[in-house]
Structures are given as structure tokens and as C-alpha cells.
Image (tube, rainbow, N blue to C red):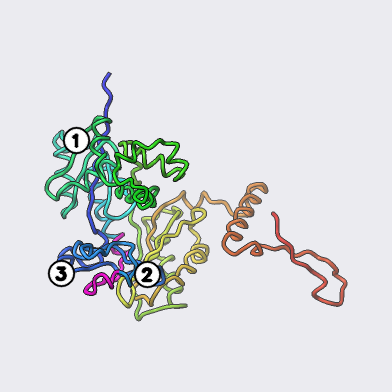
């Protein structure tokens, strides 16, 4: 009986966020350039061009150190909203050729090539050609039996020459063995391991694969055995994203707005979004709030609701505090629905629910409130001496336990 080996394709677009923020890849050839730190956060630069990396300037370096290494470094304003929109367009293009895509950040996407061969000439070459045609830009393509190996292959590929790894487990491990452990930084679960491994003298994936699993687990926790599996060519299955409709509202502000003007604009966006015919009465599970800043660049934040919502007042209560995170006045405000829930008619009000379920929801609400505002966020009033002439003696506050 023959076993079917899955084949995963990785599409890698290096410096995708930098190209979007700089206005195109042509701007990256004009000299050292990097993404400036986001206002209000740690002064760490984002992606850097190849010319900047030649001076030792890389993503995560502090701004002062980067300017000291490269005095001619040009900084561009971060554009998280533009990057998200551009990358969503790339993912939609890949889905247009029939791919079920998984992506955890802009610039990297995976999909299984097994079911696409029949649609594109019956071979892997046809799938890779369709992928390059859909993206319509410089992209590095790699194919392997696992996600991590496909990413490693894409990193070694060239713009016009895809890289395909061996399919057998032993041959795949031998292919990965000479590659640097810095590839582990591409996975969020193992991003902190490369620096520690290099301090121990472990610089290649082959050396990491020879370390006992128990020793790695004892030193690095769950990330250690995972890194060992990745170095040997094993990885978890793909988890493709769910294709969803794009539902967004945009409001151009007459002048750079902040404070109450932004809150009123947000209320208008929520009303418009809920009134869209495409929503078809469904609730919203998550929303993305974005803004185009007066000083240049954009700002973006994602909010996941504790439960699906379609009540504009409750949505304002959740989204309005996020406006305080804006680093500068805004010219344009945008609201995008990222996930849909059941129809609004299926929701129950708090008073119509059974007592046990209502008490459980209240306990969860109190727990979340206390985790944000502290243990004194929810208190109850206890009558102590109602007949006292001193008002302070009549009542007392105590922790509320539903």
C-alpha cells in the first residue's frame, strides 16, 4: 500500500512590509531604508533593506543604534493598515487559484499543492507557475512535505527558480541539517531560541536535531522539542484561513480629528457597518479599527469581542477606548469586520437566560474586569448600621462574589 506524501508550497515575499510602507520596491534601491518605530512603543526599527543590513541594521535594533551604524539611514513611517490590505489582496489572489491558504504574518503564506495539480496541468510546475502569475510580483517559492521545510526552501530559492526539497524523511533531515538555526526565528513559538542556541555553540539545524528531546525540554520548555521536530522535517498540519467576505466602512474626516470628534466618527462607522445589506443580520466576532494619520503612516488595532455582537452601543463601549491609543490626529477612520457570528436573532438577553447561565456569564465578566482594573473593580454594598447618624457608618464595601 502506497502512502501519499503531502506537498506544501510556501510563498515568501521578503521585506513585504517595508516595500508597502516605502511606496514600492523601487524605493528600496535608492539607499539604506528601514521602517521607523511605531509611535508610543519601543524604539525598535522594523524591516530594513539589503543596503541597510550591510551596515548591520536589522529589524529589532534600537533606533539610536541603527542611526549610529548607518548615519544615512532613511526612515519611512510604519503603515500597518496598508500592509494588512496589501497582504489580504495577495491571499485573495492565491485563493483565486484554488489554494487553501495559511498565513500568520504578511510576507509568508503556505498552502497544500495536492489538490491543485489537477487544476493546473497535473504537475507541481503548473501549480508554481499559477502561484507566480497570481501574485504578480517578485516571490520566492519553496515546496516540501512540511511548513517549516517549505519556508526554508523558499528562503534558498531565487525569484525565477523554485526550490523543492526531498520527500523522504531521512533525505529531508539531511537537506535541513546545514541550514542555520536562525530560521527558527520565523516561527513565533521558537523565535526566542536562535540567540540562546548560538550562545551554546549550536548554529546548524543538524546539530540541534542530534540533541536529546528531554534535554531541550528541560532547558527551553515546550519550544525545545518543537524546534527539534522542525529541524528533523516534522511539523504540524496546515490550518488554512476561512475565506470571508470583506465588509468595511471608511470615513474621511473634514479636518484632523481627535477626542470626541473621533468617538462620533466611530459611532457613525459602527451604524453604517451594521446597516450594510451584506451583513444579512449576522453578528460580528471581531473588528479591525484603523486610521490614516496626519503625520503620515497608519495605525491599526484588532479587537475580538467576548461574544458575537450586533448592538451598536456595546460595540462603542468596546471600540471607543482603543481610540486613545492613536499616536497622532487622524484624517481617515476605517472599521472592518473580520469575523461573523450567528444571526442577531439567536442572541439571548441577559435577563432571559436561565439563572445558572446568567450567573456564569456574570462571573466571567467580573473576572475579566478584575484582570484589567484590579481586585477592587467589582464590589458590593453591605448595610452595616442603617440607623446611624454618620453616613459613612451606614454602608460598607466588600468584594463581590457572584
Label placed on residue 30: 3
Crowd class of label 2 (few under 14; some 14 to 19; many from 20; radius 10 Å): some
Q: Which residue is mark 2?
A: 43
Q: Which residue: 26% across, 54% down?
A: 107
Q: Position of residue 51 (x, y in %)?
A: 18, 64
Camera-near label (1 vs 2) is: 2
Q: Nearer the viewer, residue 260 or 161?
A: 161
Q: Are marks 1 and 2 in contact (CB under 8 Å)?
A: no
Instruction: Find numbered disc 2 in the image and state the secondary structure of the residue it sits on.
Output: loop
> Eyeballing the image, is 50 above or below 164?
below
Q: Quadrant of the C terminus?
A: bottom right
Q: Which residue: 63% across, 47% down?
A: 357
Q: Which residue is mark 1?
A: 117
Residue 360 can be seen in this image: yes
- Which residue, as the protein is rendered here, is positioned at the far left? 160
Q: Which residue: 29% across, 71% down?
A: 77
Marks 3 and 2, the one that precedes in the sequence: 3
> Eyeballing the image, is 115 above or below 355?
above
Marks 1 and 2, the one that precedes in the sequence: 2
Magenta run includes residue 80: yes
> Eyeballing the image, is 327 above or below 141?
below
Crowd class of label 1 (few under 14; some 14 to 19; many from 20; radius 10 Å): some
**Magenta span of residues:** 66-84
Instruction: Find numbered disc 3 in the image and state the secondary structure of the residue it sits on.
Output: helix
Magenta run includes residue 326: no
Amino acid at each position: 500500500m502506497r502512502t501519499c506524501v503531502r506537498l506544501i508550497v510556501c510563498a515568501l515575499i521578503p521585506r513585504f512590509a517595508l516595500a508597502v510602507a516605502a511606496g514600492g520596491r523601487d524605493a528600496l534601491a535608492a539607499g539604506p531604508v528601514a521602517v521607523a518605530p511605531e509611535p508610543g512603543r519601543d524604539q525598535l526599527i522594523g524591516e530594513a533593506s539589503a543596503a541597510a543590513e550591510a551596515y548591520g541594521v536589522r529589524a529589532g535594533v534600537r533606533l539610536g543604534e541603527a542611526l549610529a551604524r548607518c548615519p544615512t539611514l532613511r526612515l519611512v513611517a510604519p503603515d500597518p493598515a496598508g500592509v494588512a490590505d496589501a497582504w489580504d489582496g495577495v491571499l485573495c489572489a492565491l485563493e483565486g487559484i484554488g489554494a487553501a491558504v495559511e498565513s500568520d504574518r504578511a510576507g509568508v503564506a503556505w498552502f497544500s499543492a495536492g489538490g491543485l495539480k489537477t487544476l493546473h496541468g497535473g504537475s507541481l510546475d503548473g501549480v508554481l507557475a499559477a502561484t507566480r502569475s497570481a501574485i504578480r510580483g517578485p516571490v520566492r517559492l519553496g515546496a516540501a512535505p512540511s511548513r517549516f521545510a517549505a519556508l526554508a526552501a523558499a528562503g534558498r530559492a531565487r525569484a525565477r527558480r523554485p526550490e523543492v526539497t526531498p520527500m523522504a524523511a531521512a533525505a529531508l533531515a539531511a537537506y535541513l541539517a546545514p541550514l542555520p538555526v536562525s530560521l527558527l526565528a520565523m516561527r513565533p513559538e521558537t523565535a526566542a531560541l536562535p540567540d540562546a542556541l548560538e550562545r551554546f555553540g549550536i548554529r546548524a539545524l543538524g546539530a540541534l536535531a542530534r540533541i536529546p528531546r528531554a534535554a531541550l525540554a528541560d532547558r527551553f520548555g515546550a519550544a525545545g522539542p518543537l524546534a527539534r521536530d522542525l529541524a528533523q522535517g516534522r511539523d504540524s498540519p496546515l490550518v488554512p484561513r476561512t475565506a470571508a467576505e470583506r465588509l468595511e466602512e471608511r470615513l474621511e474626516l473634514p479636518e484632523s480629528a481627535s477626542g470626541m470628534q473621533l468617538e462620533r466618527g466611530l459611532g457613525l462607522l459602527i451604524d453604517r457597518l451594521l446597516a450594510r445589506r451584506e451583513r444579512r443580520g449576522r453578528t460580528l466576532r471581531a473588528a479591525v479599527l484603523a486610521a490614516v494619520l496626519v503625520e503620515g503612516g497608519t495605525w491599526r488595532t484588532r479587537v475580538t469581542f467576548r461574544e458575537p455582537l450586533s448592538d451598536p452601543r456595546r460595540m462603542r463601549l468596546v471600540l471607543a477606548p482603543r481610540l486613545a491609543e492613536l499616536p497622532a490626529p487622524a484624517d481617515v477612520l476605517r472599521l472592518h469586520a473580520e469575523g461573523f457570528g450567528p444571526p442577531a436573532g439567536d442572541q439571548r438577553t441577559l435577563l432571559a437566560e436561565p439563572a445558572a447561565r446568567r450567573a456564569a456569564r456574570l462571573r466571567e465578566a467580573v473576572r475579566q474586569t478584575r484582570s484589567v482594573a484590579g481586585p477592587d473593580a467589582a464590589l458590593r454594598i453591605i448595610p452595616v448600621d442603617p440607623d446611624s447618624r454618620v453616613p459613612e457608618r451606614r454602608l460598607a464595601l466588600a468584594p463581590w462574589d457572584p
